[in-house]
Amino acid sequence: MRWLPYILLAYVMLGLQIGLGGLPRAGAVNFVLIAAVFVSLNATRSIAVPACFGLGLLQDLASIGPIGTYALIYSIVAMLIAGTDRALSAEHPLTHFVITLAGGIVTSIVLWLHGKLARYGVSSPMSLTMVSAFYSAVVAMPALWVLNRMRKYFRFRIGQRR
């Protein structure tokens, strides 16, 4: 994988995340999750997990929560998605919707559990994060369609045919 397009993707998605609102608001779209799904669908597991960890770490640094929460979440999402390329069509919009919704549900569950278990953590209601997961899945379809058109610049798998 080329790292310069990855850094640009992380920069743009994190900028959209910060500029258009954060997760605690109902209806907020998690753009960094969409980037993590894109990387996980196209890269091998050995590349997707550290790349998604980096995306989560950047989101942790930009948010007010504790460091490592989103890094853990996006690593889990990458482990669940990466390597399923034989079972899923990486270019189908329904795949984008379902995978992003599943990633949003994992995000919602981990954030809710972290809020309940951590005494200092701020617990966001599960319904708000589920609404955010649904909106992220809806926005993921056109966003991942555009990103899939630029997939050649990332060179996820050299020497392997998709």
Image: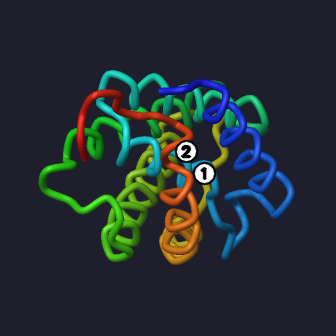
Q: Nearer the viewer, residue 61 or 124?
A: 61
Q: Is residue 146 above or below residue 120?
A: below
Percent across and percent down for residue 77 are 37, 43
Q: Establish if 56 lies above or below 106.
A: above
Q: Residue at x 47, y 27 (%)?
A: 1
Q: Residues within 10 Å of mark 2 (few under 14, many from 20)?
A: some
* Residue at 75% in and 29% down: 61
Residue for point 45% across, 22% down = 50
Residue 146 is drawn in which quadrant? bottom right
Could you say which quadrant of the image residue 11 lies in? top right
Q: Nearer the viewer, residue 144 or 131?
A: 144
Q: Judging from the image, what secondary structure is the residue with disc 1 in? A: loop
Q: Secondary structure at mark 2?
A: helix
Q: Type of residue at label 1?
A: Ser
Which x, y percent locates residue 53?
A: 51, 27
The x and y percentages for residue 49 are 39, 28
- Report whether residue 66 is seen: no
Residue 5 at least partly seen:
yes
Residue 102 horizontal side relative to residue 56, left or right:
left
Disc nearer the start of the sequence (2/1) = 2
Residue 38 - label: none
Q: Which residue is mark 1?
A: 123
In percent of the image, x 68 and y 33: which residue is there? 60
Which sits in the foreground, 12 or 154?
A: 154
Residue under pointer 2: 115
How many C-alpha atoms fall within 10 Å of the one at disc 1: few (<14), some, or many (≥20)?
A: some
In the image, taking residue 148 as reference, residue 65 lies left or right, namely right
Spatial CA distance of label 2 from label 1 is 4 Å
Q: Are marks 2 and 1 in contact (CB under 8 Å)?
A: yes
Circle 2: residue type: Gly
